[in-house]
Image (tube, rainbow, N blue to C red):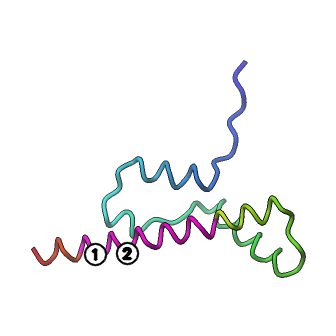
Amino acid sequence: MVAPLRDTTLLDEVLNFLVSTPTPQQIIDFHLSERLQQRLSYLLHENKVRRLTDAENAELDEYSSLNHFMSLLKIKAQTKLAEQNQA
């Protein structure tokens, strides 16, 4: 019997993208799947109207950390593209 596949997590999605060896432009264009974007929107909304559970807070922290990482990666990719265009 094969265990059912679990939903792709935020970290899974980012790691799967990175191991695909994206070009600098693909890094710049990267966005989370619609499902994960909806989950983030839900957590942000719920954080405004009620106290999140510890698990939800941890999940929101993960979004924040990975968003920061991807922002830095996109800056590096933009710099690399600019350097390539100057050469």
Please give the residue where the numbered disc 1 appears in the rendered image.
79
Which quarter of the rendering shows the N terminus? Answer: top right
The 10 Å Cα crowd at callout 2, few under 14, some 14 to 19, many 20 or more, is: some
Residue at 37%, 75% (x, y): give it.
75
Looking at the picture, tell me which residue is in the foreground, 86 or 37. 86
Residue at the bottom extreme? Answer: 48
Assess whether mark 2 and mark 1 are in contact (beta carbons under 8 angstroms): yes
Is residue 51 a member of the stretch shown in magenta?
no
Q: Mark 2 sits on what residue?
A: 75
- Give the vertical position of 45 relative to 37 (above or below): below
Position of 82 with respect to 56 (left or right) is: left
Residue type of the residue flagged with mark 1: Thr
x 43%, y 72%: residue: 72
Task: Name the image quarter holding the C terminus.
Answer: bottom left
Expressed as whole percent of the image width and height from the top left, the position of residue 42 reads 77, 70
The magenta-colored residue range is 63-81
Q: Secondary structure at mark 1?
A: helix
> Where residue 54 appears, x then y in whole percent?
83, 62
Q: Main secondary structure of the magenta part?
A: helix
Q: Going by the image, does 36 lie left or right of 74?
A: right
Residue 80 in percent (x, y) is at 25, 70
Q: Position of residue 73 (x, y in %)?
A: 41, 67
The amino acid beneath tag 2 is Ile
The one of 36 and 65 positioned closer to us in this rendering: 65
